[in-house]
Amino acid sequence: MKREQALYRRALGLSAEIQRHRRWLHQHPELSFQEHRTAAYIREVLRQLGIPYTTTATTGTLATIGTGERRVVLRADIDALPIVEQTGLPFASEHEGIMHACGHDMHTAMLLGAAALLKEREAELPGTVLVLFQPGEEQLPGGASRVLAEGALDETAPIAVFGQHVLPELPVGSIAIAAGPIFAGTDELYWRFRAAGGHAAQPQQTGDPIVAAASFICQAQTLISRRRDPLTPAVLSITAIHGGSATNIIPPEVQLQGTLRSFDQKWRQEALDWLRQTTESLAALHGVEATLEVRAGYPPLINDEQATELVREVALELLGSDHIVPFRPVMWAEDFAYYSQRFPAAFWLLGVRPPEQQTMPGLHHPSFAPDERALPIGAALLAAVAWRTLEISAL
C-alpha cells in the first residue's frame, strides 16, 4: 500500500479524535491575537502526543516532529471572526459575536491530526516536520509577519512551507490548487475630508466635504477603468461613508473607507501614489482639506511551481485525478503570503461542501458549516505532503 493511502486510512481511524478537536475549537472561538485558550488547548494536545513545542507570536505554537536536518513547515491559522453564529449546531460558539466562520477550527484540527499521524511514524521520517499553529491571520499586521519577525523560522531553514484552506464551493474529497499568484495583495484605505462646516442654506461660506467625497468616489473608479492595464487584475472598492447629522447642516468632516487589491506589486504602489495625488487635488478643487491613510496589508500569495506540483502529485495518489481542479485566482488576501515571500511555498483549497448539496453558505457567513468528512482528508494531505517533501533531493 502506498504511503499516502496508508496515512489516509490511519487518518480515518483518527476521525473521531480530529472531530473532537474541531468541535471544541468551534465552540470556543477567539479573535485575532487573543487566542489564549485556543493555544492552551493546542499545547495540551501536543503534550499528550509527546510532541515538543515552543511559543511564537505569544499565542502561536511551533511544534517539532523528527530529528533530521531537512525541515518542512505545515501551517494552520487559529483565530476566529467577529460574527454572530447562526448555524444551530449543537457545538455552536459559546462566545456571543465570535465565530469560526472562515474554517480556522477545521484547519487547526486537521493539523493536529497530521501531527498525530507523523508522530506515530516519527522514527521513519526522513527529516523534521515543523507544525505551526499561527495566530492572527484575520487582522493586520497578520500573525505570519510576527512569526517571521521574531525569527521563529530563521534557524530552521525550511525547504518549503505548506498550508491549506477550506473551500465551500468544492465538495468533500476535492482540492483546488494552482501555481503562481492565487490571492491578491491588499491595502486598507481611510480618507478624511474636512471643512469648517456650517448652515446648509449658506454653502458659499464653507467647503462641502460631502460633495468633495462624492466627487472623489466617482473619480477614484477611473483608477481601475483608465489607469490600469486591462490584463492586470485589480479592484478598488469604497466600502464605507460616514458624515453628516441633519438636513440643514453641512458637516465638518466626511470619512471614507475602502480596499485596494492587486497581484502586481509595482502597479499597487503606483495606484497608491495616484490615490494620494487625486485625494489632494480634488480636495483643493472643492476647497476642503483631505488626508489618506494607507494601512499596508498582505502581499500577493504566490505558489511556488515545484511545491505546487508536489502537492498535486500527492493529491493524485490520495484523491485521484477527478478530484483535483485548477484554482482560479481570487482577490482574497492571506497572510500565508509572507511565507511565500521567504520560502518555497504552496497553499491549496480543500473542499468542504457536502457532496449531496449543490451549494452551501460561504466563508465569513454566519451559517457557514463545513462538512466534517473533510477532516481526515485534510490531515492526511498535510502529513503526506510533508513526508514527500522531505524525501526529495531538492525543491
Image (cartoon, helix red, strand yellow):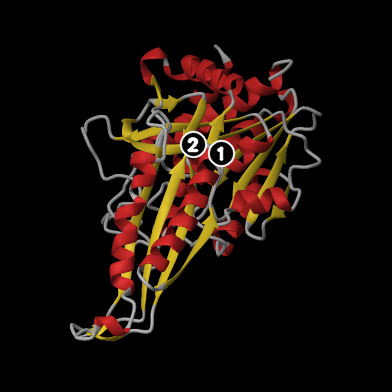
Residue 358 drawn above or below residue 187: above
In this rendering, position of residue 347 left or right of residue 278: right
Q: Quadrant of residue 132?
A: top right
Quarter placement of the N terminus:
top right
Q: Residue at x 43, y 61 (%)?
A: 281
The foreground one among 345 and 285 is 285
What's under tag 2, amino acid-wise?
Phe
Judged from this view, the residue extending furthest toward the bottom is 199
Q: What crowding class fits label 2: few (fewer than 14 Cα within 10 Å), some (14-19), or many (20 or more)?
A: many
Rendering coords of residue 184 (x, y %): 47, 40
Q: Count the marks: how many?
A: 2
Quarter placement of the C terminus:
top right
Q: Residue at x 63, y 20 (%)?
A: 388
- Depth check, mark 2 against mark 1: the one in front is 1
The foreground one among 88 and 70 is 70
Task: State the residue position of label 1.
Answer: 266
Task: State the residue position of label 2.
Answer: 263
In this rendering, position of residue 242 left or right of residue 347: left
Of helix, strand and loop, which one carries label 2?
loop
Rendering coords of residue 156 (x, y %): 78, 38
The foreground one among 181 and 200 is 200
Residues at marks 2 and 1, CA–CA distance in whole angstroms: 9 Å
